[in-house]
Image (cartoon, coloured by chain):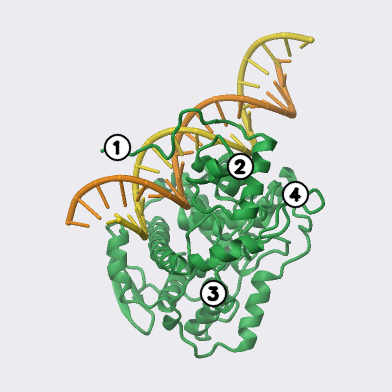
Chain colours: A green, B yellow, C orange
Amino acid sequence: MGRSPCCDKVGLKKGPWTPEEDQKLLAYIEEHGHGSWRALPAKAGLQRCGKSCRLRWTNYLRPDIKRGKFTLQEEQTIIQLHALLGNRWSAIATHLPKRTDNEIKNYWNTHLKKRLVKMGIDPVTHKPKNDALLSNDGQSKNAANLSHMAQWESARLEAEARLARQSKLRSNSFQNSLASQEFTAPSPSSPLSKPVVGPARCLNVLKAWNGVWTKPMNEGSVTSVSAGISVTGALGRDLESPTSTLGYFENAQHISSSGIGGSSNTVLYEFVGNSSGSSEGGIMNNEESEEDWKEFGNSSTGHLPQYNKDVINENSISFTSGLQDLTLPMDTIWTAESLRSNTEQISPANFVETFTDLLLSNSGDGDLSEGGGTESDNGGEGSGSGNASENCEDNKNYWNSIFNLVNNPSPSDSAMF
DNA sequence: AAGCTAGCCAACCGCTCCTAT
DNA sequence: AATAGGAGCGGTTGGCTAGCT
């Protein structure tokens, strides 16, 4: 049947926006809110299609946009989230509050992807490029396990997003009525400084990791995980990114309330939300950034569990979290559908616990913390040309570094979390 | 100074998802 | 249940700029 064009294209302007057009769009949204994007151009006196107006607003004119170079922490966050979510830029943007999905996408394509390639890491899979050369020594299987886990998390986030959309719609009219009151147009004296929305939520699994890893592993993981998630919920408001529909984890009924002390919440909240220091001002030139990257992954963590051989078998992954057991086959890709049905068996907290255990169990001979990682020390041309064992190290250290970053974020003024 | 190349990024296009009818 | 329309997302493009020859 074919889709009708989003608007009548005859006579509509394309290409770069002029300051006059920007002013018209800003003035209109300031006064009326955007309302229907399709109807907006005519009402605002713009010879543009609604889609173009929306894009201009969300990617450029919106008052809560942070422009300029990405901080190291923002880079790290993007990489972590990309490892989990893939090219779901809007979902990633949710966790970098003042960045747009378009900006993140551009930054990934022009900077980060190349950097990973340089390090010999496949930017799609986040695994060493010649991982296929690794024999059946278990390392590649474990890398595959991680990939599977990422797929699972991705599928879970899909479900979350679905829930969030539903709740968003329910509250939409209320938010719309607020929007026009909260909006403040940028002015020379206060350029694009007043956010319309608050800080974005933290990716649940990252917070969960925080929750688990900031405590010794002999403490109840479920308790820790719950604490991590509950902080997200405790913010108590809809922090939806304007560029994303990814939502809040709202199923509080899944989250154990036991063991969530107020202090635990507070500590974690401060940890994720109150960072300052070295990156003050947020600007870092590329060379500094590269240097920091070379140290990426050098720290080691404690609290690492012993490798549990029973968890990852030849043909399956078994989740034995104590609350419920689940075995999933290794020889198939976990589709969103299969995961949805399977994950019904596991509560979110339970999931995170088992997920964390598996991730931590990544090293077949046991100790990720030993990696001590100079993974990117040979940065430029290095790791890609290494032998198999070096690549195992790279793989191990790469993921280890992701975990360390979650666990031990470097001080910065990043707006993330 | 002119031409060429590569990098960056704003914007467009086509598709999917969701809702209303 | 089927269809149409709106909104949003991700891939891609094209113009601008800086650096190099």
Query: Counting residues from the N terminus, which is met first, the one under dot 4 or under dot 3?
Result: 4
Q: Quadrant of the N terminus of chain A?
A: top left
Helix, strand or loop status at disc 2: helix
Residue A145: percent from left, percent from top: 39, 61
Specify the amino acid type for callout 4.
Met
State which mark lies toward you, 1 or 2: 1
Task: Please check whether the numbered discs 4 and 3 fall on a single chain.
Answer: yes
State which mark lies toward you, 1 or 4: 1
Helix, strand or loop status at disc 3: loop
Residue A403: percent from left, percent from top: 56, 65
Tell me the residue that label 3 is attached to. A304
Q: Is residue A112 visible?
A: no
Specify the amino acid type for callout 3.
Leu
Q: Is A337 in front, or is A150?
A: A337
Query: Counting residues from the N terminus, which is met first, the one under dot 1 or under dot 2?
Result: 1
Tell me the residue that label 2 is attached to. A111
Tell me the residue that label 1 is attached to. A2
Q: CA distance from mark 1 to mark 2?
A: 38 Å
Query: Counting residues from the N terminus, which is met first, the one under dot 1 or under dot 3?
Result: 1
Report the residue at 31% width, 74% height from top.
A344
Q: Is A162 in front, or is A120?
A: A162
Specify the amino acid type for callout 2.
His
Res A32 quadrant in image: bottom right
**Disc marking residue A284:** 4
Q: CA distance from mark 4 to mark 3?
A: 32 Å
A98 over B8 or under it: above or below? below
Residue A177: percent from left, percent from top: 56, 65
Task: Please check whether the numbered discs 1 and 4 fall on a single chain.
Answer: yes
